[in-house]
Structures are given as C-alpha cells and as structure tokens.
Image: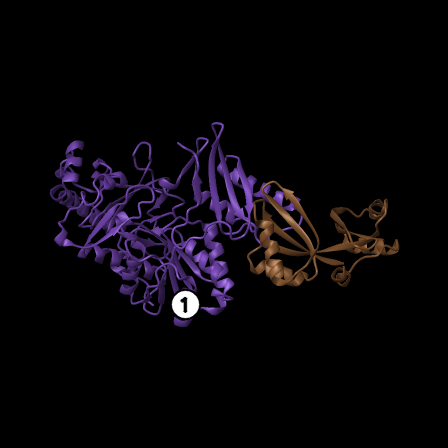
C-alpha cells in the first residue's frame, strides 16, 4: 500500500505552480501525478517520496490536503497488462474509484489505483502473483 | 456579581413604563418642535401640532424619519442643540451612501453609557471582568461606546481596538481577558489566528463571554462560536444614529432588551406603516425618548424583527426584539424574491462540512438573476473523490433552495481564499447594474 497526497485546488492560473514551489522548497520529489478536473475546482493527486512531509508542508501553507491509501501495482510494460489487472479486480467485484499510470526507466510500468475495498484488492492481487509497491519502492523509483 | 444594574427601572411594571414613555414622548415632541427647524417643518407639513400628542397611543400620528433625512441634512441639520452643548461627534462610515454625523450632549453620553451598563450586567459582566474591546475606536461608535459602558460597570477595559490580532491574542492570555467585544467576523478571524499560533481559547485563556454585533449573525453561527471558543456569545444591537451599540440579550439569550424608559419601539408593516400585533414580524421603528442633541422620531431603521412585551425569565419587564436577521439595506432581491445574507448564513452553518466563511455573488446574465454562494473547502469536507465534492455542492444548494426558494449555484473554493474581516464583513457582491 502506498500513501497518495490529495489536494483541493480551484481551477485558476498559478495553483499548480504554487504547489510545486512548496515541494521544491522542502525538497520533495513527485513520482506520479494527476489532476481530476471538475469545472471550478480540481483534485490534484500525487505520489511523492515523502508523503508525511508533503502533507505537512501543504497543510501549513493553507491547502486542504489529505493522505489516502492507494495501491501501487507493478506491471510489465507490455500490451495487455492493464486489462489483466482490471480483470482480476473485477472478477472479485472490487471497484476502481480512479486510477492513473506511469512508466519508469526500466521495463516496468506502475498503476496507481484507488479501490472501494483495499484489503480485498491486496489479497486478490497477491493471489494472482501481481507485485504491489510499498513506500520504499516509491522512494527508489 | 449583581443581578440588575437598576432593578427599580429594569423590573418596573409594564403599565408604569408605558406611562413614563407617554410623558417623555409628549415632552420630546414639544422639544424637537421648538429646537429643530427640520422637525418643525416635518410636523407642519403633516399638519401635526405638538399639543396633538397627548399620550403614548398618539405616537402613530407622528411622521416617520429616515436615514435619508440624516443624509439630506448632512452634517448637522437635524440637531436640536448648538455646538457649545455638544461633547462629541461620531460619523458613520457611509458604506451604503453619504456618511451620517451623530452629535452627543453630556447627557446623551451618560444615557448611552447607562444603557450599556444595564445590558452588560444582564449578561453577568461587571467588576470582576476584564473586557477586551476589539471594536474599532474612533469615528465608529463601537469602540468608545462599549468602552464607556464597560467602565461604568466596573469592568477593567483593555481598549485593543480592531487589528493587531497576534498581539490581541497574546494580551488576552497575559492579562486574563474574560470578555471580548468585537464583530462576529473579527472573532472568527481571531479564532483562526489563535489556532495557527497554537492557542486554544478554551484551554489557554480565561475568556468566558463574547459580545458580538455591528453586523447580523445567525443562531447557528452562535452555536459554532460558543463551541469552538468555549464561551457564551451574546448579540449586541444598536446603530450609530441611535448613539451606537446600546442593547444586548440577557443571559436567557431569548431576545434583545430595549430599555423602554429611553427608547420607544414599534414594529410596523413596512407597506402600510401600521403597527403589527405583539409577536408578529415587521419593520423596527424607534423613537429616542431622552436624546438631546439628535433625537429621532419614529426612525425607520429598516431591521426586520419581532417585538415581544412578555416578561422575560430574567425578570426584566422591558420589551425584547428578536435577533435581527438583516437590515433592509442588506436585503437582496433575486428574481423577485427577498434574500437576507443572514438566511444564507443560517442555512450554511447548519451543515457541518461547511466552514464559517461565505460570499454571495449575484449576476444578471441574459436578463436572469443568477445567485452563487461560495463556501470554503474544509478538512472535514475534503475527499479525494470528485463525486463526493460535487455531492456536497448539491447538498448545500438544495438546502439553500429549500429556505430561499430560488436556485443557487454553490461553488467550493480553497480554504482561506474568501476575505476575512477585522470589522464588518462584506458578504455580498452584487454585479447587477440595477
């Protein structure tokens, strides 16, 4: 399981720059990143190397921010991998709330996924011999 | 601690109070007719002679006065005394138009002070208290008015004025402030500032009472303030034209006592000008019975309220008005429907996910009024799922629609992005060109 930083931001110029600026000052490195946009506002979701520090830095700067447990799933960077994982979860009736993915310099790709039943998902993926990331993996990416 | 500042007057039987009011009214009418060319002309135009007013019931024969009259006669055209009888001026900020000037004789200041001393005693504030006054000192009546009233009761006054919030919080702890007086907006600002300085009003100060006013605030906001600061919060009412802050609720928190030996209160139907029955909603009209420099006859303050002459559980016989949800000046008309910012506040503060700050924005797009309410995202309300946030916006919009009867667009904005105020907060932006 990994910790994702989620942040509420109004949809207006300069908000992302401000987040990035705070991270730069604190030496926090972003590993994965996505914005869910909904009209006037957006939710910025990030996986960073030091989530607790990131949470503190953003909270102290007045942002509304939370830490959410999500799954980091390691995939081979080849066609069909994403579908396979989605299928494994779907078969056990585990719903994906949202997901985003990124590739690394190695042959691996990573899928960040929030599900409605995180314990169930961990078990299902373990049983299917699919590797899950923990925070130390994130720091080593 | 004493129970009543002046038990004989505060507990006087209603019949006797009304008798006093009648006498004072008759004298007042003669006084203004003799001393103020403005009132003389107003009465002459209405065909009223001072001798026509023989009892309290005759008050309805008198013409109303309006804020506009004070503006039209700016600066001192309605005054009844020459400068050498005045000891002070206060000047309103003129946010809704030209400023108004109020003058005070020595007796006017004394009556004002007495009114507040009675009020503060009624909420159990007195000699043993340290009152920090966070209302602005200066041309505004809030600071100096409270100051004189508090000193009269024997309170130790810390004349902090508004602003310099970090210092205020420090002094509050160092000197052991027990009572704070300021606008509810400024107190919310203080709560936030204290929190970020790691200070809890509940645990780190002796604060036990807040006296909040100069802007309307809702019952729901009272609950929030009382819970988050661990104090009892009382509403204070008044307006510069009447002297300044004058009246508060008593400890029962069931309406604001208006001292009937100083002021005559009527509640009328704003359309017909006729009095409404005891306990019914209407527009507040006040006649000053003892003011010398600038007496006001049937002054239409414009507040919508309810008058209640029933004896209060506190033992005071003077009538109460319900807490004021809004001044007529603050009322918005959106698609033909009356909306008070106080109603919006009251709905929002019932929803735990919604923070204390909000802004109402009204636009006119294609001949249609569009009302938007911005609220701030809070830690409690935040979810990393977009749907949860959209559902919250919908929930708030539907609660507002239920009370206001108009569709409202609700927009969540970032925490801290709506303006904070150290005085009276601006809660409406009306972009319509009406």
Looking at this view, is B61 or B234 the one in front? B234
**Which residue appears at 59% of the width and 49% of the height?**
A9
Q: Position of residue A92 (x, y in %)?
A: 84, 48
Q: Position of residue B61 (x, y in %)?
A: 21, 35
**Which residue appears at 47% of the width and 42% of the height?**
B360
Q: Quadrant of residue A137?
A: bottom right
Is B346 left or right of A53, judged from the image as shown?
Answer: left
Q: Position of residue B350 (x, y in %)?
A: 52, 48
Looking at this view, is B39 or B143 the one in front? B143
- Compared to residue A127, the image places residue B169 above or below, namely below
The shade of chain B is purple
Q: Quadrant of residue B159?
A: bottom left
Residue at the left extreme? B34
Question: What chain is colored brown?
Answer: A
Residue at the front extreme? A105
Query: Would you name the residue on which mark 1 appears?
Result: B172
Is B100 left or right of B214, judged from the image as shown?
Answer: left
Q: Position of residue B6 (x, y in %)?
A: 26, 60
- Compared to residue B173, the image places residue B247 above or below, namely above
Looking at this view, is B376 or B115 the one in front? B376
**Which residue appears at 14% of the width and 34% of the height?**
B44
Q: On the rendered image, what quadrant is the C terminus of chain A found in? A: bottom right
């Amino acid at each position: 399981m990994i910790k994702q930083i989620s942040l509420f931001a109004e949809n207006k110029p300069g908000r992302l720059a401000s987040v990035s600026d705070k991270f730069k000052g604190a030496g926090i490195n972003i590993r994965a990143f996505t914005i869910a946009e909904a009209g006037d506002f957006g939710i910025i979701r990030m996986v960073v190397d030091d989530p607790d520090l990131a949470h503190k830095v953003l909270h102290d700067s007045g942002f509304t921010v939370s830490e959410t447990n999500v799954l980091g799933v390691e995939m081979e960077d080849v066609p069909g991998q994403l579908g396979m994982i989605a299928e494994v979860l779907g078969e056990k009736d585990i719903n994906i709330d949202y997901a985003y993915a990124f590739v690394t310099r190695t042959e691996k790709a990573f899928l960040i996924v929030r599900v409605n039943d995180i314990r169930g998902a961990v078990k299902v993926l373990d049983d299917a011999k699919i590797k899950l990331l923990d925070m130390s993996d994130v720091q080593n990416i | 601690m004493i129970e009543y500042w002046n038990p004989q007057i505060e507990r006087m039987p209603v019949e006797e109070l009304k008798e006093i009011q009648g006498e004072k009214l008759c004298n007042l009418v003669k006084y203004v007719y003799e001393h103020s060319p403005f009132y003389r002309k107003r009465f002459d135009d209405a065909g009223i002679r001072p001798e026509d007013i023989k009892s309290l019931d005759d008050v309805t024969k008198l013409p109303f006065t309006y804020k506009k009259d004070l503006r039209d006669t700016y600066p001192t055209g309605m005054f009844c005394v020459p400068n050498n009888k005045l000891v002070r001026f206060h000047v309103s900020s003129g946010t809704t138009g030209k400023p108004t000037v109020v003058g005070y004789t020595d007796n006017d200041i004394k009556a004002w002070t007495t009114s507040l001393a009675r009020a503060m005693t009624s909420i159990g504030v007195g000699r043993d208290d340290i009152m920090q006054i966070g209302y602005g000192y200066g041309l505004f009546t809030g600071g100096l008015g409270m100051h004189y009233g508090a000193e009269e009761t024997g309170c130790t006054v810390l004349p902090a004025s508004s602003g310099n919030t970090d210092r205020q919080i420090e002094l509050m702890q160092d000197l052991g402030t027990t009572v704070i007086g300021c606008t509810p907006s400024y107190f919310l600002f203080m709560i936030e500032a204290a929190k970020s300085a790691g200070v809890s009003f509940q645990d780190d100060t002796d604060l036990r009472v807040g006296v909040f006013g100069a802007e309307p605030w809702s019952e729901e906001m009272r609950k929030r303030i009382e819970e988050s600061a661990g104090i009892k919060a009382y509403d204070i009412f008044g307006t510069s034209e009447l002297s300044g802050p004058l009246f508060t609720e008593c400890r029962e928190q069931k309406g604001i006592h208006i001292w009937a030996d100083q002021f005559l209160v009527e509640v009328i139907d704003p359309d017909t000008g006729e009095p409404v029955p005891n306990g019914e909603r209407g527009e507040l009209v006040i006649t000053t019975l003892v003011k010398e420099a600038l007496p006001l006859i049937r002054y239409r303050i414009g507040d919508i309220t309810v008058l209640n002459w029933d004896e209060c559980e506190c033992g005071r016989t003077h009538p109460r008005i319900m807490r004021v949800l809004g001044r007529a000046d603050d009322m918005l008309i959106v698609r033909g429907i009356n909306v008070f910012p106080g109603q919006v506040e009251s709905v929002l503060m019932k929803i735990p996910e919604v923070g204390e700050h909000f802004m109402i924005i009204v636009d006119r797009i294609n001949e249609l009024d569009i009302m938007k309410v911005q609220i701030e995202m809070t830690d409690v309300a935040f979810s990393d799922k977009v749907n949860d946030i959209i559902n919250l916006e919908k929930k708030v919009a539907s609660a507002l629609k239920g009370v206001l009867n108009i569709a409202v667009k609700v927009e969540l904005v970032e925490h801290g992005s709506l303006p904070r105020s150290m005085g009276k907060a601006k809660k409406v932006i009306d972009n319509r060109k009406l």
